[in-house]
Image (spheres, rainbow, N blue to C red):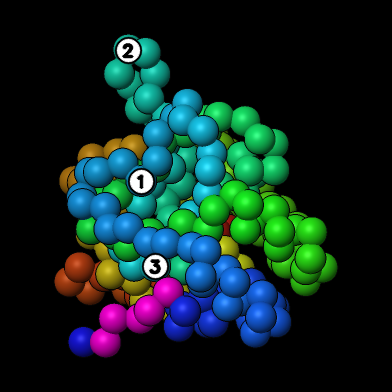
Amino acid sequence: MHRESLDEYLAATRWGTLLTPEQRARVVAESSELTVAPEGYVCRRGEPVDAWLGVLDGLVKMMITAPDGKTSTFTGIPAGGWFGEGSLLKTEPRRYDVVALRESRIARVPRRTFEWLLNTSIPFNRFLLVQLNERLGQFIGMLEAQRLHGPDARVALCVAALFNPILYPGIGNKLEVSQEEIGYLAGISRQRVNQALHALEQAKLIRVEYGAILIEDLDGLRRYRG
């Protein structure tokens, strides 16, 4: 099976296609990648933010852990997703943990390279505006689901968030994701996820396959309230 190089991967990203060949070559030359084992930390809360991060392959979750050990998940980030630009722009310590739910390849674009792109590429700046606005809308939707809606709606919005074509372009309408992984992201048990997915399938919003979910109606999934 062909393993995409960092150069091949960046050339296919929404923001990579906006760069000149010279700009992209510099990004590739100055960037690196690492592989994170399941349950391993991609980055930790409180550490200095020294890179912009992208998921080349795998699935990670963005979360916080309270002093009493209780955790809260913000969102899941599948392959194709980039994150951490807000922390880089604010030059503050990282305010969340990112943990791999399965073995994941992570790209690291150093802060100096990220800031150079900000200073030299108007298209890259426009990309970031869209990215930040879309992420804000995603977080507002997830917060609404957690506070106002039941488990079925939380699972619906959690699954819909993984299929965001702006944040995760090229993902298509099928994603290999387990019910256990959805449970981690939605903050509910695997058994309750199973019930919710059955309800969503009956509503003809998704089709559940072994180890994967196929989207039938993404807009309907986003609107679903149970």
Q: Position of residue 86 (x, y in %)?
A: 64, 44
Residue 198 visible in rendering: no
Q: Which residue was labeled with disc 2?
A: 68
> Mark 3 or 1 closer to N-term?
1
Classify mark 2: residues with Cα within 10 Å, few (<14), some (14-19) or many (20+): few
Q: Which residue was labeled with disc 3?
A: 56
Disc 2 and disc 1: Cα gap in Å?
22 Å
Main SS, magenta residues:
loop
Disc 3 and disc 1: Cα gap in Å?
13 Å
Residue in view at x 32 percent, y 62 percent: 105
> Mark 2 or 1 closer to N-term?
1
Q: Position of residue 116 (x, y in %)?
A: 71, 59
Circles 3 and 2, Cβ within 8 Å, touching? The answer is no
> Mark 3 or 2 closer to N-term?
3
- Along the line of sight, the residue nearer the viewer: 33 or 30: 30
Q: What amino acid type should be assigned to the residue bearing mark 3?
A: Leu
Q: What amino acid type should be assigned to the residue bearing mark 1?
A: Val
Classify mark 1: residues with Cα within 10 Å, few (<14), some (14-19) or many (20+): many
From the image, state whether disc 3 or disc 2 is nearer to you: 3
| Mark number, residue 42 | 1
Classify mark 3: residues with Cα within 10 Å, few (<14), some (14-19) or many (20+): many
Q: Position of residue 15 (x, y in %)?
A: 64, 72
Query: Which quarter of the image is occupied by the N terminus?
Result: bottom left
From the image, state whether disc 2 or disc 1 is nearer to you: 1
- Along the line of sight, the residue nearer the viewer: 129 or 27: 27
Q: Which residues are magenta?
A: 2-6
| Mark number, residue 217 | none
Q: Is residue 209 left or right of residue 84?
A: left
